[in-house]
């Protein structure tokens, strides 16, 4: 069962509310731009307590579908651009393709920034063993709502593209998204 069928189950008022919530969680298993738990938590922040309220459940689904549609649109635009570049003989892409995770695709940059900061708030307490530079950058990013200095952003982008462990690359990816630099570096 694909994303569309699961989304239809979320909207199906004939199903028990718990089944519809489970269908939303299944949608998030397929598309979780800022991580599974962070995506569900951010949907609750955006829409309200979807686990209990019909309107919030439908609003959460609408927010997830809107982000997924933006991501798919970015992917289609990238594919079109790559075809044109290849016809011109440019075999190495100028930019990386849109990633499936690490960035909440939205019509407004503020929503993408808020989602990344939200995910960083959840990441930080669970990773007390992370290196001091990473924890310091995460704390600064959360404290400023995603606004990093040029030096901090350079560090984030450098560490995001280096051969770093996942526990370092993931917060760097989120911080790049919070700072509006998600298109640069590896996802």
Image (cartoon, helix red, strand yellow):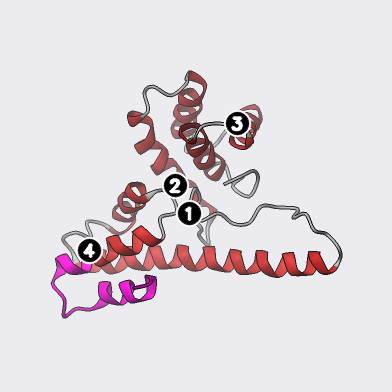
Q: Position of residue 135 (x, y in %)?
A: 45, 25
Q: Earlier in the sequence, mark 4 or mark 2?
A: 4
Marks 1 and 2 close (CB-CB < 8 Å): yes
Q: Which residue is mark 4?
A: 22
> In the figure, 167 relative to 23: above or below?
above
Magenta stretch in the rendered image: 1-21
Residue 152: x and y in percent read: 60, 28
Per the model, the C-alpha gap separating discs 2 and 3 is 22 Å
Dot 3 alpha-carbon crowd within 10 angstroms: few under 14, some 14 to 19, many 20 or more: some
Residue that carries the numbered disc 2 in the rendered image: 114
Secondary structure at badge 3 equals helix
Based on the picture, tell me whether residue 114 belongs to the magenta stretch: no
Residue drawn 40% across the image and 48% down it: 35
Residue in view at x 33 percent, y 31 percent? 126
Taking depth in this image into account, of 161 and 56 the one nearest to the observer is 161
Mark 4 or mark 2, whichever is nearer to me:
4
- Cα separation between marks 4 and 2: 25 Å
In the picture, the quarter occupied by the N terminus is: bottom left
Quarter location, residue 148: top right
**Magenta stretch: dominant secondary structure:** helix
Query: Gap in Å between the C-alphas at discs 3 and 1?
Result: 21 Å
Describe residue 118's horizontal placement relative to residue 100 as left or right: left
């Amino acid at each position: 069962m694909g994303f569309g069928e699961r989304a239809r189950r979320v909207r199906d008022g004939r199903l028990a509310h718990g089944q519809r919530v489970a269908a939303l969680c299944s949608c998030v298993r397929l598309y979780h731009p800022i991580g599974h738990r962070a995506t569900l938590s951010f949907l609750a922040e955006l829409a309200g307590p979807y686990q209990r309220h019909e309107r919030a459940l439908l609003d959460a689904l609408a927010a997830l579908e809107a982000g997924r549609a933006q991501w798919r649109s970015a992917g289609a635009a990238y594919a079109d651009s790559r075809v044109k570049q290849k016809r011109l003989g440019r075999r190495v892409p100028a930019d990386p393709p849109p990633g499936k995770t690490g960035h909440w695709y939205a019509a407004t940059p503020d929503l993408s920034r808020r989602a990344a900061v939200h995910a960083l708030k959840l990441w930080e307490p669970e990773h007390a063993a992370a290196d001091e530079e990473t924890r310091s950058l995460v704390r600064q990013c959360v404290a400023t709502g995603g606004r990093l200095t040029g030096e901090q952003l350079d560090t984030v982008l450098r560490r995001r593209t280096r051969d770093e462990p996942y526990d370092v690359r993931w917060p760097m990816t989120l911080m790049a998204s919070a700072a509006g630099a998600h298109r640069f570096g590896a996802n």
